[in-house]
Image: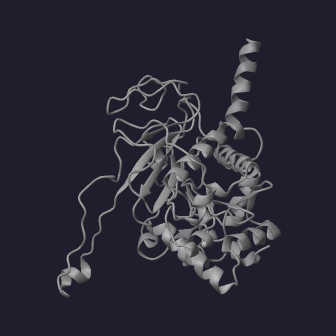
Amino acid sequence: MPDIVLDDISHRRYNPLRGSWILVSPHRNKRPWQGQEEAASKTTLPQHDPSCYLCPGNKRAQGDINPDYQKTFVFVNDYSAVKDVQDDYESPDLDGSLSSRLLHAEAVTGKCYVVTFSPSHNLTLADLSPSEILPVIETWTSLYTAHLAPSSLLAKLAAPTTLPPLSHQASPSTPQHQYRYMQIFENKGAAMGCSNPHPHGQIWTTSSLPEEPSLELEQLKTYRRQQGGSHLLADYAALELQKRERVVCSNASFLAVCPWWATWPFEILVIPFVHLRALLDFSDAQRADFADILAEVTRRYDNLFETQFPYSMGLHQAPLEGSDLEIEASYFHVHFYPPLLRSSTVRKFLVGYELLAEPQRDITPEQAAKRLRDCGGELYRKRLERGDIELQGER
């Protein structure tokens, strides 16, 4: 167990994955709350919504008709954050002027995709079984493979693949340009800015290596160099499995923990026990275990406050294009960043000190992990539905 005094004193914890610190203030859990509360998720959604642009057979914003898909569906985002074709730009060299020193910009190209997880409008990952999540993982893997640089060490593992039919913009089976990185993520819930409740995620490919994966990759490379080839996250997974203070759940291939350095109240880090650089490294068994751990984590989240638990979730893995050193130092992992703090209606905000100084949290990761460990079992909505059916039968 961590020193018991840490449960009641303010202290800082180091995040070796980013090289940063976080302030922990567990005594603040006792303060009264009179601030903003999020509305509890009481809405009962239909299985198919005629007005939803992600449901099978419906028209999307640009006029395309979705196919009658049965599992996942992929299309180029109708409102992509980056363009795949645009004018190039480089900051001009102004011979040491203030502008050349301080005003830098670079063009970023890429392509953004939307991936639906299910044809059913009223389901989430928490509602899906591992076998129903597996096609989502296979779709992620297919898209990653299609964008992988031929020069990458991972390329020899890549089976020939083609992208599914895409959006109103004609797209070849493989990308026109080689991109540097692919960020796969999901924003779940209106509290996280999700504009459509239909179960879906996004994939952004960019010609640049984004800030967060870049910070992590530098830390992973440094640790591997300093520790004689050991991987930071492999060592961390072994340590957490030994201590078990922050473990939420695990299976044969993956560990889910509230990390020592967590910023968000019920933040979870999913780590494989062995070195996997990217989705392409997964065996069939590991892919099935990954589906299982995603189902387990999201179900526990919903059970915690008996609500549709909001979060941002993202996969970090090897760049699409990178040096041999970068590829070998990469270690696949998944971040879950949920905002809820005290209940289904009270969320955490990153404001004030956290924006101007450093992140801060109240509940400790050990306390959060214990609460999530106690939330296993059947999804609460299924218990409620079964109770409603039994009540109707008695009538």
* Image quarter of residue 86: bottom left
Q: The C terminus appears in which quarter of the rendering?
A: top right
Please identify the quadrant where the N terminus is shown. bottom right
Q: Is residue 135 left or right of residue 203?
A: right
Q: Residue at x 50, y 73 (%)?
A: 215
Give residue 43's position: percent from left, percent from top.
53, 31
Determine if residue 23 is in view.
Answer: no
Residue 241, can we see it?
yes
- Residue 362 percent location from the top left of the image: 60, 66
Q: Observer-nearest residue: 372 or 291? A: 291
Residue 368 pos. (x, y %): 68, 60
The quadrant holding residue 246 is bottom right
* Picture coordinates of residue 17, whole percent (x, y): 59, 73
> Which residue is pictured at 65% across the width and 48% down the height?
301
State the residue in front, 291 or 44.
291
Left or right of 295, for residue 44: left
**Residue most extreme to the top:** 395
Residue at the (22%, 81%) spot, across then down: 100
Total marks placed = 0
